[in-house]
Image (spheres, rainbow, N blue to C red):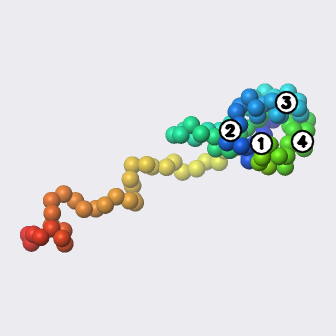
Amino acid sequence: MAKKLYVGGLPYSTTDTELKDAFAQAGAVVSAVVIVDKMSGRSKGFGFVEMSSDEEAQKAIGMMNGKDFGGRTLTVNEARPMEERPRRDFRGGNGGGNDRGGYGGGRDSGRSW
């Protein structure tokens, strides 16, 4: 059964193909993906590699964890299921904004209503 690995500390220029090629030294790579920011399209510096067996996954962890990769030190371990997180609400909610309202009436408006 395939085993998914978390790979952290990737150089921001790493591509999916480079990640797959690096882990192919340990065995058959089912998939390799570098996670990118949805807004900017830039790498977040981590990704996931799926190895074809548990044995190959353990070999990949042993070979790659702590290894220098493009000038950065990799962190490789078994991927954990994503935790449920509260959804962010970007519509303003309870912060920011200036509460100035519409028509004058402020301290410096020069009017006394």
Please name the residue shown 70% across and 33% down the image: 15
Distance, label 4 to label 3, CA atoms, is 11 Å
Question: Residue 81, which numbered label?
Answer: none
> Real-space Cα distance between discs 3 and 1?
17 Å
* Residue position marked by numbered label 4 in the rendering: 63
Q: Give the residue at x 9% y 72%.
A: 112
Residue 78 screen position, x and y as percent: 80, 44
Q: Of the two numbered discs 3 and 1 on the same chain, state the one appearing first in sequence.
A: 3
- Mark 3: few, some, or many residues within 10 Å (few <14, many ≥20)? some
Q: Quadrant of residue 113?
A: bottom left
Q: At numbered mark 1, what does the secondary structure look like: helix, strand or loop?
A: loop
Is disc 1 surrounded by few (<14), some (14 to 19) or many (20+) residues within 10 Å?
Answer: few
Q: Is residue 93 visible?
A: yes
Please give the residue where the numbered disc 3 appears in the rendered image: 24
- Residue 62 in the image, given as x and y percentages of width and height: 90, 44
Task: Please tell me which residue lies in front, 85 or 66.
Answer: 66
Compare marks 4 and 2 and give the one earlier in the sequence: 2
Asked if residue 113 lies left or right of residue 55, the reply is left
User: Is tag 4's residue or tag 1's residue first in the polypeptide sequence?
Assistant: 4
Residue placed under numbered mark 2 in the picture? 13
Find disc 1 in the rendering and name its residue: 70
Task: Give the camera-side residue of 85 and 69.
Answer: 69
Closer to the chain start, of discs 3 and 2, is 2
- Residue 42 lies left or right of residue 31; in this view the side is left
